[in-house]
């Protein structure tokens, strides 16, 4: 396998403005893909989009995923409190989002526990992509990896399917009985208005033409259908703190990185008129651990278990970011869009 071929990307895919250098001489800090990479920033201040320039060509981008974490995902080890935590999760999702749970009164009361630890509550909201069950019709998870969200939403009553362009991830999901499609969203040619919900959990940053993918998501949604999207937020607290060492830069896999203004423009260009944007501190602790490791050593192993001290500091960082978000709504690590067709 040779070096990935690249092509110049001199202009912003969102607004068409010229780019200017933001970071240079970046290397893959997570999975060791060879090469050096540079990120450009949109010169139009009202946009501020970041993107790889030059950018791997679509035919070669698969080389960036040969050692990707979705190939190593597995079940977490169970411990003595796993059953209790699972019940608390189901009770919370019932109380907060309306998912069915036939528990006893004491079991339903366990749904209060996540409110005692706001970080866990944020993670549970993310676990259903902020979607209420509604009719729990057909759902497509775009960039599904090995299918964790597909499996979770299917267990909650959705007719859930997944889509990914990584063959190994798709094969792993299919081996667990999940409905998975292999390829890119525009190439699938799903019928018009065929899904009640489309989710994109940290996938839009991986594609060459994000506006086209968003427009395709709108086309395949039914009237009133919902798009739920999460992506790294370039205006986050930790990007400001770590700069070129920020974990979420992730060259060469993250081709486009958004802020609130750039994502709003992309959604409008894709045809969405009704949407809301907000940021989340869901994985601030993980983003801090990754960014700090990259700053100190130039590398980060996503699959390694962090030492206890690092986990404690990560929790503190998440708390600080949540507090800062009260005065700066853009501080969160995740940028979230909820759109309705």
Image (cartoon, rainbow, N blue to C red):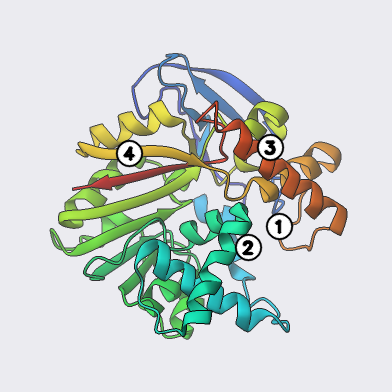
**Which one is earlier in the sequence, the residue at label 3 or at label 4?**
4
Q: Residue at x 41, y 16 (%)?
A: 46
Q: CA distance from mark 3 to mark 4?
A: 24 Å
Reading the image, the residue beneath label 4 is 276
Locate residue 8, reporting x and y percent. 48, 29
Circle 1/circle 2 CB separation < 8 Å? yes
**Could one spot residue 280 in this view of the protein?**
yes
Viewer-closest of 224 and 139: 224
**Which one is earlier in the sequence, the residue at label 3 or at label 1?**
1
Locate residue 145, reporting x and y percent. 49, 65
**Which one is earlier in the sequence, the residue at label 4 or at label 1?**
4
Locate residue 255, reporting x and y percent. 50, 40
Q: Residue at x 57, y 32 (%)?
A: 331
Circle 4/circle 1 CB separation < 8 Å? no
Reading the image, the residue beneath label 2 is 69
SS assignment at label 3: helix
Viewer-closest of 148 and 180: 148
Name above or below for residue 97 compared with residue 279: below
The number of callouts visible is 4
Reading the image, the residue beneath label 3 is 320
């Amino acid at each position: 396998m040779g070096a990935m071929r690249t092509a110049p990307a001199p202009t912003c895919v969102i607004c068409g403005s010229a780019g200017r250098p933001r970071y240079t001489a970046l290397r893959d800090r997570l999975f060791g893909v060879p090469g050096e990479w540079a990120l450009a920033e949109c010169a139009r201040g009202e946009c501020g989009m970041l993107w790889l320039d030059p950018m791997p060509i679509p035919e070669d981008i698969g080389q960036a995923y040969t050692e990707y974490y979705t190939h190593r995902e597995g079940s977490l080890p169970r411990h003595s409190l796993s059953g209790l935590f699972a019940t608390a999760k189901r009770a919370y999702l019932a109380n907060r989002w309306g998912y069915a749970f036939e528990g006893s009164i004491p079991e339903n009361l366990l749904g209060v526990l996540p409110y005692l630890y706001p970080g866990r509550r944020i993670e549970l909201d993310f676990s259903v992509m902020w979607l209420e069950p509604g009719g729990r019709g057909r759902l497509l998870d775009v960039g599904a990896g090995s299918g964790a969200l597909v499996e979770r939403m299917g267990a909650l009553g959705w007719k859930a399917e997944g889509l990914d362009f990584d063959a190994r991830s798709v094969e792993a999901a299919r081996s667990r009985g999940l409905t998975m499609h292999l390829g890119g969203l525009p190439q699938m040619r799903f019928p018009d208005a065929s899904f009640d919900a489309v989710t994109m959990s940290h996938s839009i940053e991986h594609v060459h033409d994000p506006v086209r993918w968003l427009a395709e998501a709108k086309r395949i949604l039914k009237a009133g259908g919902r798009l739920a999207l999460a992506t790294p937020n370039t205006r986050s607290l930790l990007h400001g703190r770590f700069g070129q060492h920020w974990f979420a830069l992730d060259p060469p896999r993250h081709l486009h990185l958004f802020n609130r203004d750039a994502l709003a423009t992309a959604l409008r260009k894709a045809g969405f008129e009704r949407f809301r944007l907000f940021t989340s501190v869901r994985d601030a602790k993980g983003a801090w651990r990754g960014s700090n490791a990259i700053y100190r050593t130039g590398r980060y192993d996503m699959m390694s278990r962090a030492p206890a001290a690092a986990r404690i500091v990560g929790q503190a960082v998440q708390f600080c970011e949540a507090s800062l978000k009260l005065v700066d709504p853009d501080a969160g690590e995740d940028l979230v869009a909820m759109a309705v067709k």
